[in-house]
Amino acid sequence: MSSEEVKTRMFNTFMDAFNNGNLSALDTICAPNMVDHSTAAASGQPNDLEGFKKRVNGHRIGMPDLRFSIMNMIIEGDWMAFQWEMVGTHTGPYMAVRLPAIPSASWG
């Protein structure tokens, strides 16, 4: 697969998982024994693929209008990195906090 094909696959998969809630799409790009190094994981949440899916679902529950986007993606050999933005209205429990309906945005 070319770098451009990999970028397209990664982009489409993340959009499907975060924006449409199709968490099983992550099975096509993530190894079952992956390690999620995110600091956004809930305390005690496993840092494997299932934990990652729970975290994505938690974002979607806390911000039902969640929109995830990828601005830049780089592939260098076996390494891939991307810059992302996540926006939505915080209306439910999110990262162990319940707030009134307020717009939220984060980047990474």
Image: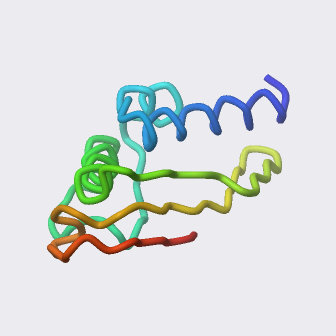
- In the foreground, 53 or 94: 94
Q: Residue at x 31, y 57 (%)?
A: 63
Kindly indicate the quadrant of the structure image that contains residue 45: bottom left
Is 55 situated left or right of 10 in this image? left
Residue at the location (79% across, 53% down)? 74
Q: Residue at x 16, y 72 (%)?
A: 96
Query: Going by the image, does 27 lie left or right of 82?
Result: left
Q: Is residue 88 above or below residue 27?
A: below
Tell me the residue at 75%/52% (across/down). 73
Q: How far from the left and from the top, in percent, is residue 32?
A: 37, 35
Q: Is residue 71 left or right of residue 84?
A: right
**Dividing the image into 4 quarters, which one contains the N terminus?**
top right
Quadrant that contains the C terminus: bottom right
Q: Position of residue 84 (x, y in %)?
A: 61, 60
Decide which of 52, 94 is in the foreground and name it: 94
Q: Nearer the viewer, residue 62 or 40?
A: 62
Locate residue 101, reporting x and y percent: 25, 70
